[in-house]
Image (cartoon, grey):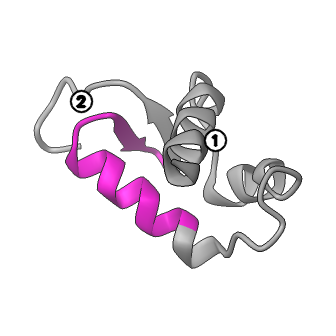
Amino acid sequence: MRDRRLEAHLLALLREAKTLEDLHAQLQSLRPGLRKATLFALLVRLRREGKVVFRQGRFVAGKAEDSNV
């Protein structure tokens, strides 16, 4: 349940493109013990599921238009 809440909050933050560092800084108040490696692993899983796109060094919520992204 806690991970679902983090995932929902993360997807809400990703309405605008953000770097890993930006996301980590913003999520520190919600989850003080959250490490960048854990956050990155969550972002990778969401990317595999098609919920997040990595483009030009930033993560953003949404679907990839191009399979080469």
Tell me the residue at 58%/40% (across/down).
5
**Label 1 secondary element:** loop
Residue at the (51%, 48%) spot, across then down: 1
The segment highlighted magenta reads 39-56
Label ID, residue 29: none
56 lies left or right of 46: right
Q: Amino acid at mark 1?
A: Lys
Q: Give whichever of discs 1 and 2 has the lower sequence position.
A: 1
Q: CA distance from mark 1 to mark 2?
A: 16 Å
Check disc 2 and report its element: helix, strand or loop: loop
What is the quadrant of residue 67 in the picture?
A: top left
Residue situated furthest front in the rendering: 1
Q: Does 47 sit left or right of 40 as displayed?
A: left
Q: Which residue is mark 1?
A: 18
Provide residue 11's location: percent of width, then percent of height.
Answer: 53, 32
Q: Amino acid at mark 2?
A: Ala
In the rendered image, residue 27, in percent from the top left (x then y), is placed at 76, 51
Q: Residue drawn at (30%, 47%), measured in percent from left and top?
A: 47
Write down the residue under mark 2.
64
